[in-house]
Amino acid sequence: MAEDTLTTTTGIGRHGAARLPSVDVDSFNIELKDDDGFLGDRASKGAFRKILDGLRKPLKKNGEDPLGDKSADAISKGTLDETLVGEDVGAAALVHGAIEEFAGELAHVTSRFLKTKAWADTERIVVGGGFRQSRVGELAIARTDILLKAEGFNVDLVPIRFDPDEAGLIGCLHLAPSWIFEAHDSILAVDIGGTNIRCGLVETRWKKAPDLSKASVWKSELWRHADDEPTREGAVKRLVKMLKGLIAEADAEDLKLAPFIGIACPGVINDDGSIAKGAQNLPGNWESSKFNLPASLVEAIPEIGGHDTAVLMHNDGVAQGLSEVPFMQDVERWGVLTIGTGLGNARFSNRRKDRGEKKDKDDKKEKKGKD
């Protein structure tokens, strides 16, 4: 891609960048393997369902399965959560058993990440993704935290704070340079997944909290592209329509929308906006050298509010993790695992020197007091 096209596409940065305004992205989208294949597959949403069905198998033979005839895939998260507190102790014990076994797998996979050079000295890991949106998921995360500590890992495993459906959109704020927030109160964000594409208008609330800790999704639209099985071009066309609809709504509400679109997308993102690998679940071939989503969006939406549109795209796991930046200022190195269709991952090092500067000031005060 020509340099002038790259400049037009991004405007204010490079896609998939290792250095962002608040953090350095030490690694993302690591694919660890063992003899059975990708390790992440052992700690996915599907892996939990498979474990649960495995525990039910001997019970089914005797017609004593307390969860009934449905496969685990057909049982909703809400139903499983209700089972944990219901009167049927057998059903509750079954789900607890699956949680315990899954936590063991997640602990094993997490320990493998922690033993890599890129994840060395990680102090905290945030767990996001759809699995986290349930009591079952929360218990599995808490149990994994205990197992890791029992193995001697000095790390905290915690659920992501924002709704996982919104965390990726909110995380896109941290792709933008801070000066963009001084004149605008919202941005457009896109979270692309293997099943859904979600577009949102994210309010920064920067004046209330410059660290973006109070940011929220003002409005969002979800499209389950997996149901429609569109072509790649059809998917981009629908995405553009969703974004233009949000721009119109922002205008109607007099929101000061920044000329910026942040995109969270699966896979390894090249600095020119192409995708190196990992986009196999998206409609059509998104890894083609002839396809560039950011460039397509700039072509379709060249201006927002009379200003040239800037687009920045990063890995979806990175974007979801970035939503936690304001709450990670008490540690230096932290990571994110997103449990969904697969296991997304990213490791960060904070760039802000707030704590170091504060310590220097405290040391100077203490020294002055002694003098």
Image (tube, grey):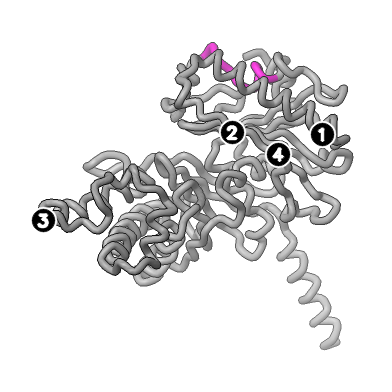
Label drawn at residue 222: 2
Earlier-in-chain disc, 2 versus 1? 2
Q: Nearer the viewer, mark 4 or mark 3?
A: 3
Label drawn at residue 125: none
Task: Give the residue at mark 1.
Answer: 257
Q: Residues within 10 Å of mark 4 (few under 14, many from 20)?
A: few
Q: Is residue 216 magenta?
A: no
State how far apart marks 4 and 1 are (Cα). Answer: 13 Å
Q: Residues within 10 Å of mark 1 (few under 14, many from 20)?
A: many
Q: Is residue 35 left or right of residue 271?
A: left
Q: Quadrant of residue 260?
A: top right
Q: Which residues make up the magenta segment?
A: 289-297
Q: Is residue 148 visible?
A: no
Task: Give the residue at mark 3.
Answer: 62
In the image, what residue occupies the spot 27% across and 55% down? 67
Task: Give the residue at mark 4.
Answer: 219
Q: Is residue 35 left or right of residue 310?
A: left
Earlier-in-chain disc, 4 versus 1? 4
Under circle 3, the secondary element is loop
